[in-house]
Amino acid sequence: MAHHRRRPTLALLLTGLMLLLVLATSAPSGNWARPVEGEDDGIDLLRRAAETSRVTAYDGVQSVAVRSAGTLATERAEVRHRPGEGTGYAEVTTRNAVAGRSLVVGPTSSARPDERVLESLEHNYRVTRAGSDTVAGRTAEVVDARRGDGSVAGRFWVDERTSLPLRRDVLDATGEVTHSVRFVTLAVGDDTGTLPGSSGETGHWRNTLSPRERTRLERRGWTLPERISWNLPLVDARSKRTTDGRVVHLSYSDGLSIVSVFVQRGQLGHESVGTTSGMRPVVEGGGTIYVDDSGQSRRMWESGGFVYTVLADAPPEMTGTVVGALPDPDGSGFWARVWRGFERLGSRIADMAGR
Amino acid sequence: MEHLGERLSALVDGELGHAERDRALAHLASCETCRFEAEMLRRLKRRLHGLDGPEPSTDLMGRLSALKESSTGEPPLGPPAGPSGGHGPLGTHPSLGSSRPIGGGLPGTPHGGHPAAEPEPARGPVRRSATPLSLLRPPWGRTRYAVAGASVVALALGTAFVAGDEREGAPVVRPALEQYEVEHAVVSGQAPDLGPPEGDEGGGQRALDGQAPDDAATPR
């Protein structure tokens, strides 16, 4: 009898184990579905490269290529970095040219969110060393960032002699380069040249937005998420006062690409998005979003009294993820207008309560 | 001969004593003038009795019935009916609703000749129109709440509709795309696009070469 009594218990146990097995195997298994575990023997080299790029003087020509419609659109600029002074960028001038456009980024140590980007990279990919190569005539150590399925999502080249970052590529699932930043020429250690004078372009926004300030703005109706998705955390937040009011710049990164989100109060008028900016209106879900994919991905729309502008040198799916996580564009129907009115009233009440 | 004068009114009202009444009646038998005046006084008194009292408003009746209903729990009824017979003078009844005079109109004038003085047959206790009022009251209460709710919803939707006007919201802005691109490039650790302004296609280094830039240049 005891033998018969155990059979149902055993059957239940086996059923439970089978259920657990089914659940485990049916979990999302896409390339981006979960963090990649394993030894990251290349992350230290990348951290050293980030630090070196701040404390080492160098001059060079940098090339930035972005894939769009099957081709790579390439821009080049002269780069001059002087520790303690900043980094200057200037238009590459042709022979006998009088002057080009230029700008200078100050020497703030927080100019780039390198550490948080590297943390995201370490979390999302397996970062391993992958031999050596040559970039700009210099021997470089290669570091691969691999997805869960083992495919390469990004590749870094680090100067073997100075540890300066020489090149980085972002690859899509088919292995094609979608975004590439590389030095075409590079001279290290010669700090005799001076930084170019700025031609009027504003440099880096120095006003870092603290978490407390970001929370305060969120209570007043701003949408400033801490994380877009599991692999896209906020790595940097800044703000700047303009003639149109405060503009907040949020940067989200998976470790390879950075997606910038600019948020400001206001709405778009006919004069806001002209044909000169190259953006075309696309109606989605009753609202209008302005799109430009001729090179860098750009999106712009209004929602609930705020204007969102997204800039990305990233795979299209990442740009779509960021846009989808932000408020939908305002609709134009009756209920859309009523809903917009409720949002505005709520925002005003929150403003008054926050004062 | 001395006429009755003030005593004539007391006679008609039945306020004289027996002796005084006998003397007055004896005088009436011989005095045509006083007899005529007594008859006129009696007619006037009957006509006054035939006049109807002021009709209370339906709202007042409803509230009075509700008061009674809430205090006693009894079904709403009309005011207590007074004694019939037409002997009660105006204002002598306990409640306003019962102040209607009971009794017919003047002889020969069944309708009283006045819209407010329509005589009412004096046949037992009269039940007022309390039942129709009680039937009306609950639907009015529900309708009142429904109308109030609908008004609040309409007001909220109307306010939101006005506030949601695109022209009335936040000011129209023009995002500084060029500045944003520079900011994005700097945070991304890459050179910003410093090429010529759009429309100047002749200069700059922008190229669509279909592949990543090669390492044509050599390090210094």
Image (cartoon, rainbow, N blue to C red):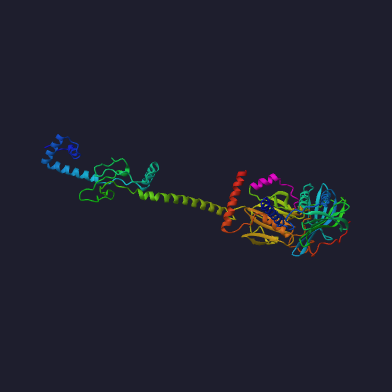
- The front one of B17 and A107 is B17
- The front one of B106 and A81 is B106
Please give the name of the residue rendered at 36% of the width and 50% of the height, measured from the top-left corner: B132
Residue A92 lies in magenta, yes or no?
A: no
Seen in the picture, residue B196 relative to B146 is either above or below; the reply is below
- The front one of B9 and A148 is A148
Left or right for A45, reference B3? right
Q: Is residue A234 visible?
A: yes
Residue B45 screen position, x and y as percent = 22, 43
Residue A76 occupies quadrant: bottom right
Residue B196 screen position, x and y as percent = 76, 60
Residue A307 occupies quadrant: bottom right
Residue B46 screen position, x and y as percent = 22, 45
- The front one of A133 and A81 is A133
Write down the region rendered in magenta. A201-219
Report the quarter where the C terminus of chain A lies. top right
Q: Is residue A112 visible?
A: no
Residue A282 screen position, x and y as percent = 65, 62
Q: Which residue appears farthest toward the left when viewing the image?
A: B30
Left or right for A51, reference A207? right
Left or right for A31, reference B162? right
Number of disc labels: 0
